[in-house]
Image (cartoon, rainbow, N blue to C red):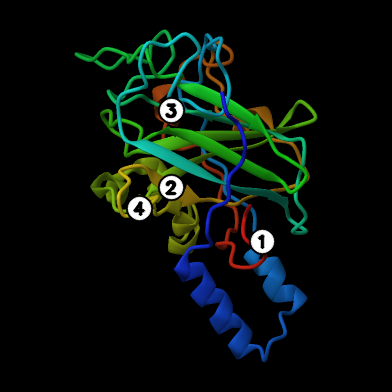
């Protein structure tokens, strides 16, 4: 699979915000403003469907598996950005994992097939990539399918030196179910929720494929076990139902507005 990282453009909204910030500060960005912009990405539950059997193909292109006869069903999406620490420095050689439902809302998990649905055998379901020297990562995948009780979402985990540093979720702007999703609604303030919602836009006027930018900011302390949402059955085991929407840690987060283009 081709894992070459290609550039995205900084969204206009981010350019405007940075421009306005420079105007109001007379062209000088203080350390306190920079620190606020680099607040930590919030943690979220791992959920019950982290794969309990990983696919043989684990690259960062989930739309086509090795030996597959056809690409996965669904709307193709790409997202990526930089992995940064709280000091704004890129984190290289870190592992970024992605797992999600297929177009039918089914996961690669022994209990991940939704009632009345079948899992797409052409969809990889799980992928990973190591950040480069600039902290860059990128995934090519599809829009996740809906299943009962949730909105569209991607699961993300960051590992550094074999230690889990962050487990979180990424959401898609404009999805009606966002307004009533229990996990998303539990992510603190409105600004915090907006920080993990990204607008996926067509790659070109002719393209039906969508792309988004998402920079991730991690702290220096590895996650504790209870933060990772592991079920009683071990990695990938189901979570107790009472914890499904209650494992989020309230952490301060502002959207990233500073720095060069993510790639």
Q: At x 46% / y 69%, what residue is drawn? A: 12
Answer yes or no: do the residues labelled 1 and 2 have beta carbons within 8 Å?
A: no
Distance (Cα) linking label 4 and label 2: 12 Å
| SS at badge 4 | loop
In this picture, is 60 found above or below 184? above
In the drawing, what numbered circle is on residue 38? 1
Q: Mark 1: few, some, or many residues within 10 Å (few <14, many ≥20)?
A: many
Dot 1 or dot 2, earlier in sequence: 1
Q: CA distance from mark 1 to mark 2?
A: 23 Å
| Closer-to-camera residue (38/226) | 38
Residue on which disc 3 sits: 100
Element type at mark 3: loop
Residue drawn at point x = 45 percent, y = 55 percent: 193
The Cα atoms of the two marked residues, 4 and 1, are separated by 21 Å
For residue 129, which quarter of the picture? top right
Proximity of marks 4 and 1: CB atoms separated by less than 8 Å: no
Helix, strand or loop for disc 1: loop
Residue under circle 4? 173
The residue wearing badge 2 is: 211
Closer to the camera: disc 2 or disc 3?
A: 2
Could you tell me which quadrant the N terminus lies in? top right
Quadrant of res 256: bottom right
């Amino acid at each position: 699979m081709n894992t070459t990282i290609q550039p995205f453009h900084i969204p206009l909204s981010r350019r405007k915000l940075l421009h306005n910030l420079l105007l109001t500060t007379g062209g000088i960005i203080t350390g306190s403003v920079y620190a606020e912009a680099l607040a930590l990405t919030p943690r979220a539950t791992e959920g019950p469907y982290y794969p309990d059997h990983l696919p043989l193909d684990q690259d960062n292109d989930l739309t086509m598996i090795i030996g597959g006869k056809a690409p996965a069903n669904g709307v193709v999406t790409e997202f990526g950005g930089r992995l940064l620490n709280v000091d704004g420095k890129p984190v290289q050689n870190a592992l970024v994992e992605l797992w999600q439902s297929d177009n039918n809302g089914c996961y690669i998990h022994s209990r991940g097939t939704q009632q009345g649905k079948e899992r797409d055998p052409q969809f990889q379901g799980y992928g990973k990539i190591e950040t480069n020297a600039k902290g860059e990562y990128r995934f090519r995948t599809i829009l996740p399918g809906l299943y009962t009780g949730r909105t569209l979402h991607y699961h993300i985990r960051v590992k550094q030196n074999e230690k889990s540093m962050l487990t979180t979720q990424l959401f898609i702007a404009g999805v009606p179910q966002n307004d009533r999703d229990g996990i998303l609604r539990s992510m603190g303030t409105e600004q915090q929720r907006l920080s993990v919602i990204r607008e996926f836009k067509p790659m070109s006027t002719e393209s039906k494929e969508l792309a988004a930018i998402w920079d991730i900011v991690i702290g220096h302390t590895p996650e504790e076990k209870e933060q990772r949402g592991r079920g009683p059955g071990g990695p990938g085991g189901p979570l107790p139902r009472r914890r499904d929407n209650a494992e989020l840690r309230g952490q301060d987060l502002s959207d990233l507005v500073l720095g060069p283009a993510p790639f």
